Image (tube, rainbow, N blue to C red):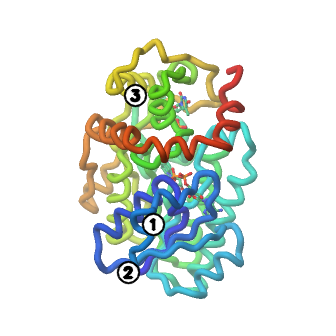
Amino acid sequence: MKILLTGGAGFIGSNFVRYVLGAHRDVEVVNLDALTYAGNLENLSDVEKDPRYAFVKGDISRLEDVRAVFGEHRFDAVVNFAAESHVDRSLHLGAERFVLTNVLGTQILLDACREYRVPRFLQVSTDEVYGSLGATGRFTEDTPLAPNNPYSATKAAADFLVRAAHHSHGMDTVVTRCSNNFGPFQFPEKLIPLMIANALEDKPLPVYGDGLHVRDWIYVLDHCAAIDTVLRKGAPGEVYNIGGMYDVPNLDVVKKILAILKKPETLITFVKDRPGHDRRYAMEAVKIRRELGWQPARTFDEALRETIEWYLASKTWLNRVRSGEYVKYYERMYAGR
Ligand code: NAD
Ligand code: TYD
């Protein structure tokens, strides 16, 4: 199976490259990535010499980049990870790039799959397309899409384009909607790695609002196994929710990180809330378990410990990704908040 994987130099994509090459002998991966601030080839240094792996620098929102890669290879499947993925950036730094990559980029890939007759397209989506839950209930695949921020709006738009490609053109598409991931190689702009990085330096841990917003957490390698399962066994045109079934308030997660690192809770600093901050996400990931036999392999506590150990052992990686542009980003997001 020859897979075109987009966004493979990012957090989940790089974990997936390593995962599929390890899980299957008969797989080849071409990684098409624009190497934005979130893309880092260092995330893949251990697989770059594998003859089954190739990297191509290119932008999914540029037709010529996409056509070049489809012209050169014959793919059995496309897995689209490439995205602008951070809600805060979409709110504070502008959403235009989100529309270009997440919406236009997805359509360009779908068109190329149709033209080059690629047998399967998998769109990596998110639980955020469903919007926010009240105090009870969970998202199912039938929950209406109601995105509340520019990031989730562009991801929802992409989901609709994938749906349209299936319905209008009979393309074999599948969509996975996953909850919040954590694990090795996550860029420290997202909650868990940001809190680990700050705690390691005894810096304040900026918790938005009252810290009682609930997220459903999944270890990134469990997500990778789920995507691989859907890619191989999912039914055409279907959507599959993926979740860790571990939904807790942000404050609980931050306190667990501090406890593992033996740092004081006085580091927690409540800061001004994110505008339009979704209150609660919780996933019902029953369909993928019942129909495809997938379920998460690790508990949250085990995986959080492993993740923290990885960050402790990867200080060079962390310092490198936090130099340069990150310093300006952090200043802009958190100064005076
Ligand atoms: P990330 O921001 O770490 O990585 C994104 C990657 O895409 C980077 O390597 C970047 O260089 C690349 N990229 C960005 N724009 C591109 C373009 N125009 N052309 C080609 N490459 C481009 O993101 P992530 O956290 O690894 O998320 C991957 C996917 O999973 C995204 O589609 C995201 O919406 C989805 N997702 C993420 C989470 C999560 O918790 N992180 C949860 C559910 C779904
Ligand atoms: P994040 O990792 O940005 O993921 P998402 O917005 O996609 O769920 O944020 C997870 C939760 O943590 C979200 O409720 C916002 C909150 N948060 C903070 O409280 N402080 C922070 O510095 C960040 C980055 C997030």
Say what secondary structure mark 3 lies in.
Answer: helix
**Quadrant of the drawing holding the N terminus:** bottom left
* Amino acid under disc 1: Val
> Circle 1 sits in a helix, a strand or a loop, which is it?
strand
Can you tell me whether the CB of the residue at mark 3 lies under 8 Å from the nearest atom of ligand 2?
Answer: yes
Crowd around label 1: few <14 · some 14–19 · many ≥20 (10 Å): many
Q: Position of residue 216 (x, y in %)?
A: 40, 38
Residue 166 percent location from the top left of the image: 53, 72
Instruction: Please tell me which residue lies in front, 122 or 172.
Output: 122
Specify the amino acid type for callout 3.
Val
Q: Position of residue 7 (x, y in %)?
A: 55, 62
Name the quadrant containing residue 149: top right
Comparing 11 with 211, the one in front is 11
Q: CA distance from mark 2 to mark 3?
A: 38 Å
Lower sequence index among marks 2 and 3: 2
**Structural distance between the alpha carbons of marks 1 and 2:** 17 Å
Which residue is label 3 attached to? 253
